[in-house]
Image (cartoon, rainbow, N blue to C red):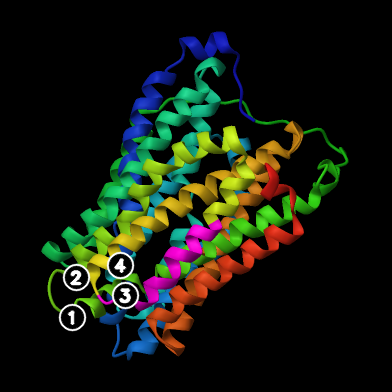
């Protein structure tokens, strides 16, 4: 890990880096999320597809990015240890801008899938921004700095679907990709000109034997269950992404500002997540994280199942808002339990595995959502998600009884 002592960090430009990268991650968050509400609609414009084909190809389009990201992320991480995080920021922002620009030029669905895979190859701007800030900030300010930085990307991702829906409505879907590419190039220029990094390459001892990861844990069964839980929860969330705009269009009877409404619906879970996650975290610290996790699963099942039977946009919006509450209970609590049950020496390793399982959940979920909607209908995707979460709850309840006592 890149490191300089605290005296050097105090005198370095860590505050300026934080402010600049907050702005860059805010813009990047908007850019990454603003294309989500209309991606499925864009697929429908690239060919003469029926309803089942649009759903299936939408799943492939969403899954392509996450598949490549899951494969290449460890490679980029190792390269960052040798070359520095600033280089990775420039690589990620410029490469993603190029892939967005090419998406706007796509003339068929297979080109779009290829350019989405290219986006996955260059992923990692926000994670490298966090790593750069962590490596340059004095340790006594690191928690505050990283907490501040996270609000930049989260706020951008919340606003992105709404902004993307408006841009698509005003400028067309295709032109929105070009606007998104320009935003990402702006983050590249700002990072190149204004961000400074004092970098020292990581030196690893040669011939050092690595202990098996699971052997470092007192309760490896719990770790495996929690990692699989991350995959299932993310799979459920991601299965909705390929079809949410198509579902909104159907509920609106193919009339009105569909991309705008789809953007608002997509943003609602993030809003409730920000409101509830800190409160649920404090409750878990007091009463047991395991209880929050169990309650989160039950609540998620209750809000996902009726989404398959709604008859209005308002009802869907209310239920999607509730999904953010369940996510605020599930994702942070899983990470908290991984932290509490991991030795310090394995914390980074287990979180990297958790990120890998999350990426796999994104990939399989996107593909599953498109496939189920294509084979059956949109409502089956919500019902199957509820069933998967219920199965995950049952596994946690019976396989790891300690969670229902106090976590």
Q: Are marks 3 and 2 in contact (CB under 8 Å)?
A: no
Gap between marks 4 and 2 measured at Cα: 14 Å
Q: Secondary structure at mark 2?
A: helix
Tell me the mark number nearer the camera, choosing from 4 and 2: 4
Q: Secondary structure at mark 1?
A: loop
Q: Nearer the viewer, residue 222 or 20?
A: 222
Tell me the mark number nearer the camera, choosing from 1 and 4: 4
Please report whichever mark, 1 or 4, sits nearer to the chain's N-terminal start.
Answer: 1
Q: Are marks 1 and 4 in contact (CB under 8 Å)?
A: no
- Pointer 4 residue: 316
Report crowding for label 4: few under 14, some 14 to 19, many 20 or more residues within 10 A (C-alpha): many
Q: Are marks 1 and 2 in contact (CB under 8 Å)?
A: yes
Residue at the image position 73 percent from the left and 32 percent from the top = 344
Residue 139 to residue 327: above or below = above
- Pointer 2 residue: 258
- Pointer 3 residue: 310
Residue 405 visible: yes
Tell me the mark number nearer the camera, choosing from 3 and 2: 3
- Pointer 1 residue: 254
Q: Is residue 360 left or right of residue 227?
A: left
Gap between marks 1 and 2 measured at Cα: 8 Å
User: Looking at the picture, how far across and down is residue 86, in whole percent?
Assistant: 47, 35
Residue 180 to residue 64: above or below = above
**Residue span colored magenta:** 297-311
Please report whichever mark, 4 or 2, sits nearer to the chain's N-terminal start.
Answer: 2
Residue 380's tag is none
Q: Is residue 375 left or right of residue 344?
A: left
> Where on the picture, by quarter, is residue 147?
top left
Is residue 300 shown in magenta? yes
Q: Are marks 4 and 3 in contact (CB under 8 Å)?
A: yes
């Amino acid at each position: 890990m890149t490191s300089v002592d605290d005296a050097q960090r105090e005198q370095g430009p860590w505050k300026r880096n934080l402010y600049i990268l907050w702005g860059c991650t805010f813009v990047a968050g908007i850019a990454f999320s603003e294309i989500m509400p209309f991606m499925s609609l864009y697929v429908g414009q690239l060919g003469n597809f029926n309803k089942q084909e649009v759903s299936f190809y939408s799943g492939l389009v969403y899954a392509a990015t996450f598949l490549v990201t899951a494969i290449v992320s460890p490679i980029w991480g190792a390269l960052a240890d040798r070359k520095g995080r600033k280089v990775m920021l420039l690589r990620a922002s410029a490469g993603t801008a190029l892939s967005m620009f090419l998406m706007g030029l796509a003339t068929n669905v297979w080109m779009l899938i290829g350019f989405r895979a290219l986006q996955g190859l260059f992923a990692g701007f926000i994670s490298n921004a966090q790593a750069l800030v962590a490596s340059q900030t004095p340790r006594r300010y690191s928690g505050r700095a990283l907490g501040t930085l996270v609000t930049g990307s989260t706020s951008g991702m919340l606003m992105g679907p709404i902004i993307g829906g408006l841009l698509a409505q005003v400028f067309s879907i295709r032109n929105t990709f070009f606007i998104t590419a320009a935003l990402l190039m702006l983050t590249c220029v700002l990072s190149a000109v204004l961000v400074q990094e004092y970098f020292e390459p990581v030196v690893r001892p040669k011939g050092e034997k690595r202990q098996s990861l699971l052997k470092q844990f007192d309760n490896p069964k719990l770790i495996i269950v929690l990692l699989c839980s991350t995959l299932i929860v993310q799979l459920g969330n991601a299965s909705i992404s390929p079809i949410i705009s198509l579902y909104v269009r159907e509920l609106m009877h193919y009339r009105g500002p569909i991309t705008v409404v789809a953007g608002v619906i997509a943003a609602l879970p993030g809003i409730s997540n920000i409101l509830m996650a800190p409160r649920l975290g404090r409750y878990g610290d007091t009463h047991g994280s395991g209880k929050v996790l169990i309650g989160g699963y039950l609540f998620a099942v209750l809000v996902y199942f009726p989404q398959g039977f709604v008859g209005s946009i308002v009802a869907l919006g209310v239920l999607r808002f509730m999904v953010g509450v369940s996510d605020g209970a599930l994702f942070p609590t899983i990470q908290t339990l991984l932290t509490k049950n991991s030795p310090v020496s394995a914390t980074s390793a287990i979180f990297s595995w958790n990120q890998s399982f999350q990426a796999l959940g994104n990939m399989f979920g996107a593909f599953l959502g498109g496939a189920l909607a294509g084979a059956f209908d949109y409502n089956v995707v919500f019902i199957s998600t509820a069933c998967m979460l219920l199965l995950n709850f049952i596994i946690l309840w019976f396989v790891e009884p300690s969670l229902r006592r106090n976590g």
